[in-house]
Image: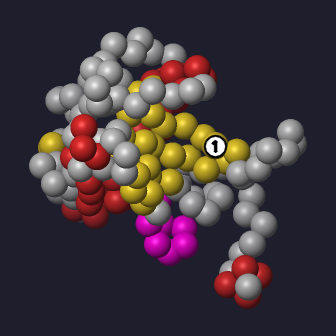
């Protein structure tokens, strides 16, 4: 088996495991966390988006609490377009008032690439057998929200209505 086909198979396995994890773990979970750092959400539906940092597949350490899911892009009752997000609160009490919103460029490059390979609380680098903690994670100093955009990128859902820069202008 060539290295390229092994890498492709490994990536496919990872993406399948990630999709399964997102499906299974964005359910309601018990929220027993330190109130000094963990944000208090006004909407009780936020608990439905809670992600237990000890249950992420292949991650052998606690990445801390987070929230992930899909957000509709409008208030329309017929809206089918949704953006996938993953939010990690600040690990520092001093950073609880600060919010960084991360959107990879492109457009159309998954923001999970930034989360998993650049600035998230754990790194899953190419060529490594398992993820490792990221001591330089941006959420050590601020709340960070990774957003998959535009519609149709990564886990975001729906059919894009704009296809190029001319239509956007």
The answer to which quarter of the image holds residue 111 is bottom left
* Front one among 86 and 56: 86
Q: Is 169 left, or right, of 50 in this rendering?
A: right
Seen from the viewer's position, the closer of residues 39 and 29 is: 39
x and y percent of residue 145 in the render?
Answer: 43, 49
Q: Is residue 26 left or right of residue 125?
A: right
User: In the displayed structure, would residue 164 be above or below residue 142?
Assistant: below
Q: Name the residue: 75% across, 72% down.
A: 162
Residue 112 can be seen, yes or no: no
State the SS at label 1: strand
Which quarter of the rendered picture does the C terminus lie within? bottom right
Counting from the top left corner in percent of width and height, residue 22 is at 47, 33
Q: What residue is shown at x 76% (from left), y 50% (from top)?
A: 74
- Quadrant containing the N terminus is bottom left
At horizontal 72% and vertical 79% (from top left) the residue drawn is 168
Residue 73: x and y in percent read 71, 51
- Residue at image mark 1: 71
Vertical relation: 151 (above or below) 83: below
Where on the picture, by quarter, is residue 56? Answer: top left
- Find residue 65 and report its horizontal and vertical position in percent: 33, 29
Is residue 26 on the magenta stretch? no
- Report the magenta residues as a range: 104-112
Dominant secondary structure, magenta: loop
Q: Is residue 166 visible?
A: yes
Pick the front one: 160 or 49 = 49
Q: Which coloring applies here?
A: secondary structure
* Outermost left residue: 135
The quadrant holding residue 127 is bottom left
The residue that appears at 61% across and 63% down in the rendered structure is 150
């Amino acid at each position: 088996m060539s290295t390229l086909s092994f890498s492709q198979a490994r990536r496919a396995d990872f993406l399948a495991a990630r999709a399964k994890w997102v499906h299974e773990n964005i359910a309601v979970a018990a929220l027993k966390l330190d109130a000094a750092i963990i944000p208090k959400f006004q909407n009780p539906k936020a608990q439905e988006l809670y992600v237990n940092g000890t249950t992420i597949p292949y991650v052998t350490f606690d990445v801390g609490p987070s929230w992930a899911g899909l957000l509709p892009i409008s208030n329309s009752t017929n809206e089918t377009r949704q953006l996938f997000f993953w939010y990690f609160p600040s690990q520092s009490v001093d950073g609880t008032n600060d919010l960084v919103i991360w959107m990879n460029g492109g457009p159309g490059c998954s923001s999970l690439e930034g989360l998993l390979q650049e600035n998230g609380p754990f790194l899953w680098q190419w060529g490594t057998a398992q993820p490792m903690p990221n001591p330089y994670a941006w959420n050590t100093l601020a709340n960070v929200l990774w957003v998959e955009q535009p519609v149709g990128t990564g886990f975001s859902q729906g059919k894009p209505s704009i296809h190029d820069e001319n239509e956007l202008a």
